[in-house]
Image (cartoon, helix red, strand yellow):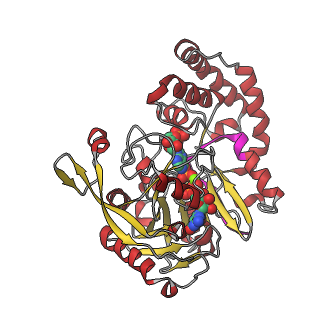
Amino acid sequence: MANVIIVGAQWGDEGKGKVVDIYTEHAQNVVRYQGGNNAGHTLVVGDEKTVLHLIPSGILHQGKRCIIGNGVVLDPKVFLEEIDGLKKKGYLQDDSQLMVDGAVNIIMPYHKLIDIARERKSGAKKIGTTGRGIGPTYEDKVGRRGIRFADLLKPETFKHKVNEVLPEKNFYLEKFLGEEPLSAEAIIEEYLGYADRLRGYLGRASTCLDVAMKDGENILFEGAQGSLLDVDHGTYPYVTSSSTIAAGACTGSGVGPHCIDEVIGISKAYVTRVGEGPFPTELEDEMGERLRAAGNEFGATTGRPRRTGWLDIVALREAVRTNGLTGIALTKTDVLNDLETIKVCTAYRYREQLIEEFPQDLDILKECTPVYEEIPGWQCDINSITEYATLPQKVRDYVDRIEAWTGCPVVLVSVGPRRSETIIRTNPF
Ligand code: GDP
Ligand code: IMO
Ligand code: MG
């Protein structure tokens, strides 16, 4: 029996969805524990592509329990649309497969409006958020004025809460952000319209997972975003508003840390980032464009082109430490197929100093320039390879170097977007 956490080891979009879909074979329960529909997790089965924003990436497997833990923030409209999309494709035929914790905070219309208006007002200082209302919803959660999933299911409680909070929101929207005020009646009508369909999904993640563990079942925890977007450990303030690191799995679902057996960090064989913020190995040249084209690096949620750059070992070591990674899943290795030379950043230069630890101070990080080692490329197609031993020696050398630099084993190598394009070296379950 093993309980495994999957986390993004970079700035998101590392291929978490794909790895969760693959590992689901070995787990009975898959849990999202933080973030909301800022996430876009892509699964490719055969020729069919599915992008999930809220529902755990285990949902394409029949009979697996998919849980949205208390740490998630949920937009009910997006959630119901995602359910409909899955049902139309023939998935999620049994509603008992899906559960939402009652303590999940609800993304309200004013959260989305504040998110977008604030970004607009910030101009050049914007974060580059997904505009889905994530930050403002977490602010209200921590500020103890959030509206939870269970509240939405009780019409009187919901009405009362909306009426209580809206004057403050409208004051801020009108007076500070210069937006039109929102109507309580319209919000109540829209959201209570969702409530009947949502009721059947209400549950409690913590107790459900406790029973599952006592029954000897496995749990797969699905992180969203990435370690460098963590609100505490990421490149603050250019981060998301939740605990994206492995520890978030415990608070975001109500299980104790001793229940966790393995923590697998997903890392691309290079790096991408969407939105603003420092990115030391960013390539703003032809090579960056080449990686974007080869990796089809356009956001699964907003469609924005992703910024691209070489693999950053300094940043990856940070993820190994903050998450306590027991393994790395290396994805999009095939994207490097054509390159003669691959560069890897193993340290930063800051003024006259050589730095091997990711700086916490953004003013220092902004001034860091990467120190690169060059690795010969393999210059052949590796997408159809299914055995580690038959990968070209140069690919295995790249993997060996990553293990040596990070001190963490590479347990999976992904060589294409499809389920079948995956080489498992060590199974964490
Ligand atoms: P997530 O947010 O971490 O789940 O990642 P995204 O789905 O946002 O972005 C990863 C993208 O890369 C998706 O389009 C995947 O289909 C694709 N992908 C995942 N693994 C691989 C791989 O090994 N090779 C290639 N070429 N594409 C991959
Ligand atoms: P997945 O789960 C990549 C980024 C945004 C922005 C910052 C804050 O698919 O890896 P937010 O809307 O969360 O307040 O935006 O975080 N961001 C992501 N980048 N992948 C994601 O999710 C992201 N979710 C948020 O681009 O820089
Ligand atoms: Mg994504």
Residue name at image x 60 percent, y 50 percent: 298
Counting from the top left corner in percent of width and height, residue 128 is at 51, 37
Residue 407 versus residue 249: which sits nearer the camera? 407
User: For residue 28, which quarter of the picture?
Assistant: bottom right
Residue 224 visible in this rendered orientation of the protein: no
Residue 360 versus residue 142: which sits nearer the camera? 360
Q: How many marks?
A: 0
Identity of the residue furthest to the left in this view: 352
Q: Going by the image, does 238 lie left or right of 335? A: left
Residue 142 versus residue 59: which sits nearer the camera? 59
Counting from the top left corner in percent of width and height, residue 21 is at 62, 67
Identity of the residue furthest to the bottom in this view: 389
User: For residue 167, which quarter of the picture?
Assistant: top right
Counting from the top left corner in percent of width and height, residue 402 is at 36, 70
Q: Going by the image, does 358 lie left or right of 376? A: left
Task: Reply above or below: 335 against 388.
Answer: above
Residue 354 versus residue 66: which sits nearer the camera? 354
Magenta segment range?
A: 61-79
Residue name at image x 38 percent, y 59 percent: 323
Task: Reply above or below: 202 against 144.
Answer: below
Q: Does the magenta stretch include residue 124?
A: no
Q: Going by the image, does 235 lie left or right of 5? A: left
Counting from the top left corner in percent of width and height, residue 190 is at 76, 30
Residue name at image x 55 percent, y 18 percent: 177
Residue 147 visible in this rendered orientation of the protein: yes
Identity of the residue furthest to the top in this view: 175
Task: Reply above or below: 356 against 239.
Answer: below
